[in-house]
Amino acid sequence: MSADPRQGALAFLQHEAAGGFLLAAAALAALLVSNSPLEPLYDRLLDTPLGVRVGPLAVEKPLLLWINDGLMAVFFFLVGLEIKRELIAGELSTFGQAALPAVAAVGGMAVPTLIYVSINAGNAAALKGWAIPSATDIAFAVGVLALLGPRIPASLKIFLLALAIIDDLGAIVIIALFYTDDLHWIALLLAGIGGAILLALNRAGVTRLAPYLLTGTCIWVCVLKSGVHATLAGVVVAIAIPMRARAPGELTLLEQLEESLHPWVAFAILPLFAFANAGVSLQGLSVAKLIEPVPLGIALGLCIGKPLGILGATWLAIQGGLAPRPEGASWAQVLGVGMLGGIGFTMSLFIGMLAFPDPAYAAPLRLGVLAGSLLSALAGYLVLRLSAPPPAPRE
């Protein structure tokens, strides 16, 4: 990690951009397989049961849930590390730096929610998906931004990164508060004890990975059995990882873990999640199915609610003197970034699966997320490309 927060943020953006392209390829592969003769094999693969047993303790789930509950816990662990680093020493470490993206993120979560709720009002089951269009996929959004190259100001790229990180934090809070099953208090108590042990290790100055890894694994099992979604265990463990170096100039344990996990998450875990969850049959697809309340609410929340919420909140914050506009960025470019914020994909699919465990909602959920994310990506790219100055001629 670079000592300069801005340089570290830009390096992170470059890494996320490469992962975003692979993520798109995995989602496209899932769509192709789901609409080919290989579709039954695809379904059987995801339903393959896998189990781990240690004495009387057993965890057995189909492959799909190992991906969504297990591998995605690693993704949320990395998100937790990124949030902690940005809050302590990065682009969110001061009020002035965090104010504008924080306000923009809140607006970008509130307006899509209002659109979805207004379209699905009166349907209690459908209203459980209110949070689906409030999410932003960092990898996809940054991947689209990377296509525009150096014509986009660095300040705008960092604004998008900070906004998406705060958006992820909001998604974590929403999952914890609103998408939790019946609680098993003994398992939750054991997870809490594990969290206390991690904090004690941090306060004691322990900087070796093994104690955190062992305790974190136990916390994941307890959270899995508690009724709280298991991926939140990754965030709990990340908060306790120390951000102090053993010697001046050395990377902290948190930074080492970030650097080690980024390639695995960007190039393996997220593409695997996309391949496992983006498959939807397009057989019999019609305009009538796309404008049903659930997919319509998700799609409009993402492609209209997100840019309106982000742009409106940003304008209010700047007009109110809370923070200046990103240096070198026009209002049209801020609008374009708001449109890229509507690429919900990974986080929207993830929240949707928690909101709608009923398989009857699987196709409407995926149609809404894919349609809204695709429209947001295309609109954001076009607006940013048309509003950016032409590249400087080569000598």
Image: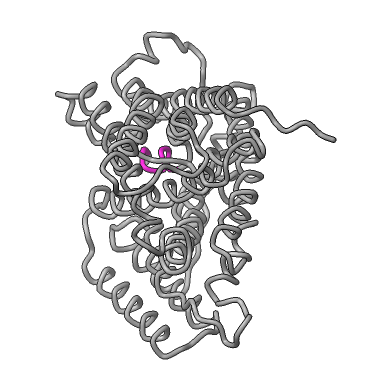
Quarter of the image that includes the C terminus: top right
The location of residue 34, given as percent across then percent down, is: 57, 26
Most foreground residue, 284 or 367: 367
Left or right for 12, reference 309 = right
Q: Residue 351 magenta-drawn?
A: yes
**142 relative to 77, above or below:** above
Q: Which residues are magenta?
A: 347-352
For the point 20% across and 24% down, the residue is 118
Using the rendered image of the protein, determine whether residue 56 is visible from the camera's viewpoint: no
Which residue is drawn at the image coordinates 59% and 60% (left, top)?
A: 8
- Of 125 and 47, nearer the camera is 125
Most extreme residue toward the top is 287
| Residue 284 picture location, percent across and down | 47, 11
User: Is 385 placed above or below 150 here?
Assistant: above
* Residue 170 visible in the picture: yes
Residue projecting furthest to the bottom: 204
Query: Hey, which quadrant is residue 238 in on the image?
Result: bottom left
Query: Which of the 4 quarters of the picture holds residue 394?
Result: top right
